[in-house]
Image (spheres, rainbow, N blue to C red):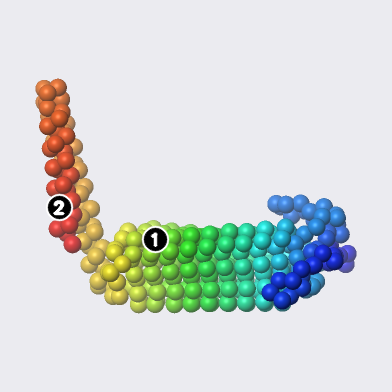
């Protein structure tokens, strides 16, 4: 086997470990960047950190050290650090200021970027994306086409999959499952054995605990409301549906009232109309709060 890189004498110490820059010994042609023979790459501790086979590469000032390994066609670029016993494999991509550590695995076509952290025994697979300042730890799994971004945290034995998106300061933990086209954002907490799937939006300060399940609809509750039983959640969703029905009828009534106004009104009473519209809006909010 012809080696694709060599380790140079351009070295530095990181966390008490000596790492040295690599240099390409032949052209490497992945589907994104191209490496020419003689190009310098990032840093490794030894040849076990970067496979001599495949099109994998460590670029820029990225570092791979410890017993960590980058293999197949995976790339680690930017200022990313892969360490301990972490594995970056297949066609995955790790960049930015990302840290992949412990026994974490990034594989398939997954992307971990920005300042994200993947640690412990966490797995990021499929076409999943973890970005921003997001953290995936514990035995958590982020898979399929899921996206975890912002300051979101996925930990414990939680699974995030499907086409779901976790953002903001949301926290998913324990054995929680997020799937389908679910969108979790803001300061939401989903824990226990809670399930969020389907076309569902959970935002604001909502807390879903225990074995509650949401499949479709929108949940936006304040931080002092905790849904720790299915009955409590179902009653909330019924109240929301009641408000939406009232709002729909109210808007229809306002529209019918407007189109039925005589032509003279539009010439002489527009200012009064604005005053009346303001009162109607206030009345709508009164109806809203009467539902809860």
Q: Tell me the element at label 2.
A: helix
Mark 1 crowdedness (10 Å alpha carbons): few <14, some 14-19, many ≥20: many
Q: How far from the left and from the top, in percent, is residue 245? A: 20, 52
Residue 32 shows in the view: yes
34 and 83: which is toward the camera: 83
- For residue 119, side relative to residue 61 (left or right): left
The residue under label 1 is 186
- For residue 218, side relative to residue 121 (left or right): left
Q: Quadrant of the C terminus?
A: bottom left
197 and 77: which is toward the camera: 77
Label annotation for residue 135: none
Mark 2 crowdedness (10 Å alpha carbons): few <14, some 14-19, many ≥20: few
x 82%, y 64%: residue: 10
The residue under label 2 is 286
Q: How far from the left and from the top, in percent, is residue 45? A: 77, 72
Q: How far from the left and from the top, in percent, is residue 140? A: 52, 73
- Structural distance between the alpha carbons of marks 2 and 1: 26 Å
Q: Is residue 57 above or below residue 272?
A: below
Q: Quadrant of residue 235?
A: bottom left
Q: Is residue 9 above or below residue 289?
A: below
Q: Quadrant of residue 196?
A: bottom left
x 47%, y 65%: residue: 152
Q: Quadrant of the N terminus?
A: bottom right
Q: Tell me the element at label 1.
A: loop
Q: How far from the left and from the top, in percent, is residue 109? A: 62, 61
Pointer 2 or 1: first along the chain: 1
Name the residue furthest right. Answer: 2
């Amino acid at each position: 086997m012809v080696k694709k890189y060599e380790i140079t004498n351009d070295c530095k110490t990181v966390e008490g470990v000596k790492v040295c820059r690599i240099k390409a010994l032949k052209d490497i042609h992945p589907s994104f960047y191209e490496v020419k023979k003689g190009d310098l790459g990032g840093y490794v501790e030894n040849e076990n950190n970067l496979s001599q086979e495949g099109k994998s590469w460590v670029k820029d000032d990225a570092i791979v050290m410890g017993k960590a390994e980058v293999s197949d066609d995976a790339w680690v670029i930017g200022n990313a650090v892969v360490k301990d016993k972490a594995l970056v494999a297949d066609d995955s991509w790790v960049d930015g200021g990302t840290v992949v550590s412990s026994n974490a695995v990034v594989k398939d076509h997954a992307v971990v970027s920005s300042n994200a952290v993947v640690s412990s025994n966490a797995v990021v697979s499929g076409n999943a994306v973890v970005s921003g300042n997001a953290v995936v730890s514990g035995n958590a799994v982020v898979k399929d086409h899921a996206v975890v971004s912002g300051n979101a945290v996925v930990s414990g034995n939680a699974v995030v999959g499907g086409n779901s998106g976790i953002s903001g300061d949301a926290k998913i933990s324990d054995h929680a499952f997020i799937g389908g086209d679910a969108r979790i954002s803001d300061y939401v907490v989903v824990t226990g054995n809670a399930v969020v799937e389907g076309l569902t939006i959970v935002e604001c300060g909502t807390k879903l605990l225990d074995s509650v399940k949401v499949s479709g609809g929108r949940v936006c509750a304040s931080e002092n409301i905790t849904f720790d039983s299915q009955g409590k959640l179902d009653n909330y969703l019924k109240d929301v549906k009641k408000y939406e029905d009232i709002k729909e009828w109210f808007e229809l009534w306002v529209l019918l009232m407007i189109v039925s106004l005589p032509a003279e009104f539009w010439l002489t009473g527009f200012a009064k109309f604005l005053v009346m519209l303001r009162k109607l809006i206030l009345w709508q909010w009164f109806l809203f709060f009467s539902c809860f």
